[in-house]
Amino acid sequence: MDLKRDAVEAYLRSLAGEDAELVGMRTLGETIPTTEDVKGFGYGSPVLLEYRSKEKAMSAVLSTMRVQEGFGHDHFSDRAQVLLWQHSTFGKLPKHARSIDVGYFDTKGRLSSCGEAQEFFILMEKIDGREYFFDLERVKEEGATDLDMRRAEVLSTYLAEIHDTKQESLALYRRKIRDTVGHGECIMGILDDYPTQSDFLDPGELATIEKKCVDWRWRLREKTGRLSQVHGDFHPWNVMFRSGTDFSVLDRSRGEWGEAADDITAMTTNYIFYSVQKSLRLEGGLKDLFELFFENYLDRTGDEELLSVIAPFFAFRMMVVASPTWYPLLSGDVRRKLFNFLENVLDSEEFDYRKVNSYLEKPQI
């Protein structure tokens, strides 16, 4: 990216006043300033800006983060997070260089400030429809209709289609597995939210589960060829159906690339969840939807390996739906069944989607 002189001067005027004038700019380490554009800015070389405002000579250093895979800096949003954090904290530490502002470059190379931001927001189009979880609540009580079966099939087909887009990146696949286990929104964060003592859990059980999930992280770490385009949070509250099988999805917020098993479990966990609330088993229409979802997906993708990598993703999603914070009204019996499932799946080399009820039984010690 080229750093445009006119864009820099306009930005300085937005900060220091309309009389601000760019005197010169140069890459740190160089000795001769220029008022021309700086070529190739943004690759880890800060630029010194020298300017005047209110007849006072001033200077500041403009820098971005180097774009690279790995170390949690893979995405634009990762780098934004670091820079926003730096701006908010540099001035709080004695003797630390002060941050004057934080901002962004737009698609035309203009610099805009967001240094006064307190919270960020997003403005989205309105989607008509009804969340898919209403369907599951009805199926739990009344059974599945032909439309319910067709909706499960179209959702499974949708995932098969988006997962067909692959990318080669060791760093991004490993990050997805690492984040699933260690991120605050995922396994370790959810487990930290559980009460220290629970009637449905044995002493030390959560620690044992977490250790098994860490083992799974290392088991999956080298399966980087599985990196796929994903939704990232494909659960029934993020799917809106209109008439028939016409639907839209919402709230993709955990990244563009990941493991297909994450999307599969985000949805299919809920077929189990709703059925267990009814009968402590997977049965009836919800069992039909669950098995159809898997059968259709596997038929369309041929991804039998999915069944040998799915365990930690099922564990994560079961921890969420069993959570006293997210679902405070569940009985202890329901929570126990969900934990039976996740522990038995973690202990299995390969998941058998036709034997869910065996996973719901108390694990053998």
Image (cartoon, rainbow, N blue to C red):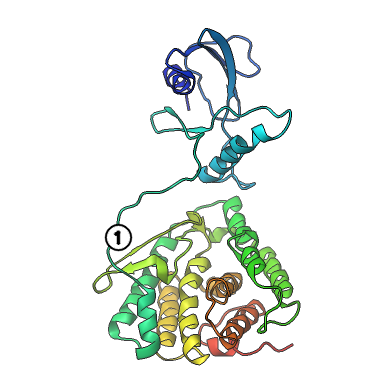
Percent of width and height locating residue 186:
59, 63
Quadrant of the rendered image containing residue 300: bottom left
> Farthest residue in the left direction?
243
The residue indicated by pointer 1 is 127
Viewer-side residue, 307 vs 89: 89
Q: Is residue 155 above or below residue 142?
A: above
Residue at image point 27% right, 68% down: 246
Residue 303 is at least partly visible in this image:
no
Secondary structure under badge 1? loop
In-image side of 158 versus 176 (left or right): left
From the image, which quarter does the C terminus lie in? bottom right
Percent of width and height locating residue 235:
44, 69
Residue at image point 43% right, 79% down: 295
Residue at image point 62% right, 56% down: 174
Q: Is residue 10 above or below residue 180?
A: above
Residue 118 is at least partly visible in this image:
yes
Viewer-side residue, 309 vs 24: 24
Q: How many marks?
A: 1
Kind of residue at disc 1: Ile
Viewer-side residue, 71 vs 337: 337
> Farthest residue in the top direction?
55
Q: Is residue 46 above or below residue 333?
A: above
